[in-house]
Image (cartoon, rainbow, N blue to C red):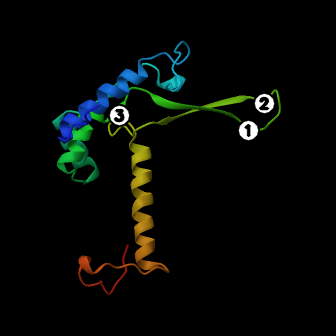
């Protein structure tokens, strides 16, 4: 098995192999290692260059080349991961089903993406102004004010 060194070829290599793995029915396969039922038949959904440009504008971010390639080829999959659980251990307890993005969909998961961006910002901010007082020399001179 030769793993491609070129990033674009590597991402297509990942796409081909994961989609092949997801194409095998876990209920009828004799393989020891199979995909979860919810992932059976999943396909990757890539983004166009224009969609990536719009996402950068919308979220005021800039993706490096490798991340743009990832989004173009392996942005997200065409379904969400399913979780089933019960709130209690009672035998007749209702089964609760929840879905969560396997990979965030930049075109549809605005709430989740905004929440994770806020969490990342708040975490870094607290490291800078909180008890840790983190400030790297590579960031330049530390500002006198700590305005959020």
- In the rendering, at what x and y percent does residue 47 appear? 24, 33
Residue 147 placement, left or right of 68? right
What residue sits 50% from the left and 81% below the top?
131
- In the rendering, at what x and y percent does residue 123 appear? 45, 66
* First along the sequence among labels 2 and 3: 3
For mark 3, give the secondary structure: strand
Q: Circle 2 sits on which residue? A: 93
Q: Circle 3 sits on which residue? A: 76
For mark 1, give the secondary structure: loop
Asked if the residue at tag 1 contacts the one at tag 2, i.e. Cβ–Cβ closer than 8 Å, the answer is: yes
Query: 45 or 30, which is in the foreground?
Result: 30
- In the rendering, at what x and y percent does residue 87 appear? 73, 38
Q: Residue furthest top?
A: 28
**Real-space Cα separation, disc 2 to disc 3, in angstroms:** 33 Å
Quadrant the N terminus occupies: top left
Residue 100 placement, left or right of 11? right
For mark 2, give the secondary structure: loop
Label 3 environment density (alpha carbons within 10 Å; few <14, some 14–19, many ≥20): many
Q: Circle 1 sits on which residue? A: 87
């Amino acid at each position: 098995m030769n793993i491609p060194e070129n990033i674009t070829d590597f991402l297509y290599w990942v796409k081909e192999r994961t989609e092949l793995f997801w194409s095998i029915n876990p209920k009828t396969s004799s393989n020891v290692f199979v995909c979860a039922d919810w992932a059976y038949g999943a396909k990757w959904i890539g983004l166009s260059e224009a969609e990536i440009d719009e996402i950068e504008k919308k979220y005021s971010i800039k993706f490096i080349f490798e991340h743009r390639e990832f989004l173009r080829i392996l942005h997200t999959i065409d379904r969400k991961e399913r979780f089933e659980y019960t709130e209690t251990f009672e035998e007749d307890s209702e089964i609760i089903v929840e879905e969560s993005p396997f990979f965030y969909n930049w075109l549809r998961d605005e709430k989740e993406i905004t929440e994770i961006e806020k969490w990342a910002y708040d975490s870094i901010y607290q490291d800078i102004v909180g008890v840790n007082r983190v400030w790297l020399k590579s960031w330049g001179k530390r500002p006198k004010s700590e305005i959020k």
